[in-house]
Amino acid sequence: EDFAVLFDGLEAKARFVIPRAPRPYYGGYGWTLERASGGDLEALRRELNVRAEQLETLLAAQLKTKKTLGAPIAIGFSQGAMLTYLLATRAEPILGVAIPIAGLLLDEARLEKRAPKEAPRIHAFHGDADPLIPFATGERTARKLAQRGYTITFHRGAGVPHRIPGAYRDAIMRTLKRAIDEVGVQ
């Protein structure tokens, strides 16, 4: 419910599937109780891979049962961004566009040497004042993906901490709107 308000006022024809993360966490929900900063990274990596498989199954079911124009777009913040990167870098991705916000790709070892021909475009956003997932970490992920042939743009949020404030949100929504328009005409 908290993430859904991000899309308030977005003028685009799209169906949104916003799954609730399974783990209760500080009055909300998280994908895992492990953290990228100061947590058990191996446990985080394992659990996020399981969650990515579950989300991919959900997306595949949606594509089978609902009339859909274009490929799905994944957008996620923090752990959701980590999941977005995982979905975008599958050997046989089903996404058309990925928009990770304030995240990183933890499981670089499973990347192919070259991006698949059908790899989604990635529009990554990361605030340069993020104390939880440092900007340099997100930037390194974008650089590694570009080196492997992914089409990725990396948007720096000047002074943005680990949140999605006003003007930064507007930039993300403009990118999402363009992505919806792009995948809908394929």
Image (cartoon, rainbow, N blue to C red):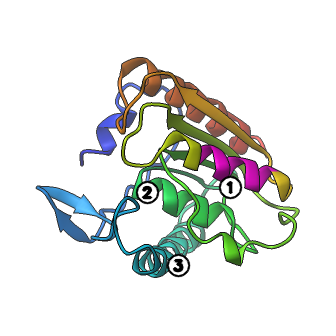
- In the image, is residue 146 above or below residue 185? below
Q: Residues within 10 Å of mark 3 (few under 14, many from 20)?
A: some
The residues colored magenta run: 138-146
Mark toward the viewer: 1 or 2:
2
Element on which disc 3 rests: helix
Element on which disc 2 rests: helix
Q: Which residue is mark 3?
A: 53
In primary-sequence order, the first of circles 1 and 2 is 1
- In the image, is residue 72 above or below residue 57? above
Q: Which residue is mark 1?
A: 71
Is residue 142 within the magenta segment?
Answer: yes
Cβ atoms under marks 3 and 1 closer than 8 Å: no
In primary-sequence order, the first of circles 3 and 1 is 3
Give residue 8's position: percent from left, percent from top. 34, 30
The quadrant where residue 26 appears: bottom left
Q: Residues within 10 Å of mark 1 (few under 14, many from 20)?
A: some
Give residue 165's position: percent from left, percent from top. 35, 25
The quadrant where residue 155 appears: top right
Magenta span main SS: helix
x 23%, y 71%: residue: 23
x 50%, y 22%: residue: 158
In the displayed structure, does residue 135 sit left or right of residue 96? Answer: left
Element on which disc 1 rests: loop
Residue type marked 3:
Glu
Between the C-alphas of marks 3 and 1, the distance is 17 Å
Q: Which residue is mark 2?
A: 80
Is residue 12 within the magenta segment?
Answer: no
Give residue 65's position: percent from left, percent from top. 53, 70
